[in-house]
Image (cartoon, rainbow, N blue to C red):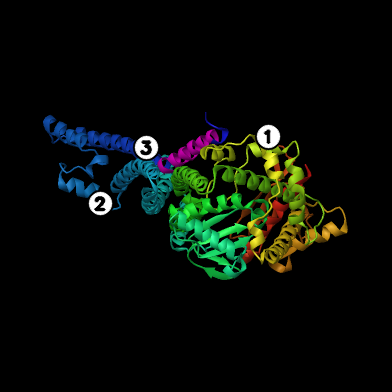
Amino acid sequence: MATKSDAALRQELLKVLLYAALALFLIPALTYGFVRYANHDRDADVLRSVETKAYADNTASSEEKEEFISFYRKHPPSQVCGDRVAAQGYREDMCETFGTAWQFYTMQRTALWTLVGGVVLLVAIGALGGLAFVNRQWQYASFVVGWRLMTLAGAAEVVLQGVMGVWLSFWVTAFFAQKYYIKLIAVVGLLVLAGVAVLVTKIFQRVPSNNNVDGECIAEADAPLLWRRIRHMATRLKTAPPDHIVAGIDTNFFVTEAPLTVGGKPLKGRSLFVSIPLLRVLSVPEADAVLGHELAHFRGGDTRASAQLGPKLTQYDHYVHGMQEGGFTLVVYYFMRLYRMVFQIALSRDSREREYKADRTAAKLISAQAISQSLVKIAAYDNYRSSTERALFERDHRLDNTLGIAAAVAQGLRPYAASIDFVDDMRTAHIPHPFDSHPPLAQRMKQVGHPLDPDDYGAIVLEVPKTTWADDITTADAIEQRLWAAYEQQFARNHEQSLAYRYEPANEQERQLVLKYFPPVVFQLKNGATVEVNYSGIAPSDGEPLVEWDAVKALQYNASSFGDSLTVTLNEKGVIGSKTLKVKLHGLGKQKDQFNAVVGHYWQRHQIMRRSAE
């Protein structure tokens, strides 16, 4: 039976497929249809002209007239450019390069082959997506080929559809209205050029790698028994042990062969991340089961594959995001996103199977009971910590830098496990992980052959381990203290910034906090005039009243050689539709981008504030 998430995924996939088809076929189909229609009309006009001319020629016999007319019927102007049977002189006259017949013939073929190319591309996306389901080697090859194909196809689509768009912007009005509009052609041309510029920029743009991990390296001297145990398990699994053990306070364990930066220092090779707070709640066998699970990823080549594929996925996602914001590059965005979605389905299935395999390996290495109980404890800790932090973040007053999150979670975890809400929360629990899509808790326990009754979860969490691996790490307390202090300071800063978005200042203290993040920004205009953007609205200096954010429904920046302006659509209804007003921005000049960014930022704050008050 399909889950709700499966149904939602199918719906999203179908929607993206529809948008991708529209993006690939709309402009070429319009071009092809317009050329067919115009060619039919032009051919009819030429034939009528030929017939009139032939019948008016008194020097030609009836047979010669019919032969003359028949030639044009067999070789109409719309087909002569590709008609090698037609007289060479006639073809050369009609098909002069860049002439009307040449343009229509070229655009028709361009549109047709672009349509064919779109169909081939969709088939290729399906085929490459199918290969990604075969195995890990084919998955990597599929993505490398797919990435290159999507990039080349994207460049071709932007250029070809851009040419068709500019051509249509001239010929549609020229054909139907017998005149053309320079501004329309210029606007379409600029959109296409901007799209090409974005395309080229994103191809060569490097994505900054974010491989920072909040933690500290554990030297062997600071945890000799833990290091010995990990090496022993690695030997039993016939895999190399990690080169580094990194301890942190995040609610997960993971391994990676990708380069990391820990405490400002680069790490290369195999790294194992362990969570000190989780080590404190796991018994030694339970922690061994988790560590064995992670080491199994080393043995299976999972970490090597992730290190190889991960940066490429990041680069691809960055490129696709750029296509979404590049205007005309939307013709590329949807089919590139479609391929990414298909590939992600294959990647998630493979990730799920790898997790099951690692769980089974850990169950054989330690015990199925240990792995199942560790899953329950990790999920319970993550649920309770998340709810504790969420409750803190939702508070409407500023927080101190010392929040005591670690102590609150440690003291409240067992009462939470004994509460009536605990079992319901755990039924849908997932195990947190930074790199993989972990399957639901119940499925993972079933896979290792040791499913637990949800009614027994509480007792498992309530059990206090006699000894833990955290006890062996001599620096554990100091590491936790440093990391929690930094984490809580950042948490308090993030919370304060969220208050600046949420507050509708009710007193001076709240007003000062909002002003800290949203101070008035003044822009200089022509002849000493100014316009100020603040958390209340937009205030011109020319005697016009403040445009309050509450009154704003939509904003539109208008660039003009006679002076820029901002059209504000108001919530207030007029005789026809909503009322509008204009804020004059003469002389804004190079401040335009900053002005638009500030206006968008401050208006967004106001919208968030209103939603928070609901």
Which is more N-terminal, label 2 or label 3? 3
Indicate left or right for 249 with 91 as reference.
right
Q: Which mark is residue 33?
A: 3
Q: Nearer the viewer, mark 1 or mark 3?
A: 1
Q: Nearer the viewer, mark 3 or mark 2?
A: 3
Residue carrying label 2:
96
Residue 389: image location, x then y, percent: 73, 51
Dot 1 falls on a residue whose secondary structure is helix
Packing grade of label 1 (10 A; few <14, some 14-19, many >=20) is few
Q: Which stretch did the figure color magenta?
A: 6-25
Q: Amino acid at mark 1?
A: Asp
User: Gap between marks 1 and 3, in whole Å?
Assistant: 66 Å
In front of the other: 230 or 322 = 230
Q: How far apart, in angstroms, are the residues tagged by discs 3 and 2?
A: 23 Å
Q: In percent of the image, x 50 and y 56: which residue is there? A: 233
- Name the foreground residue: 541 vs 16: 16
Q: Give, as a three-letter code, the residue at label 2.
A: Glu
- Tag 3's secondary structure? helix
Pointer 3 local density, CA inside 10 Å: few below 14, some 14–19, many at least 20: some
Residue type at mark 3 is Gly
Give the labeled residue for mark 1: 455
Does the CB distance between marks 2 and 1 fall below 8 Å?
Answer: no
**Pointer 3 and pointer 2: residues touching (CB < 8 Å)?**
no
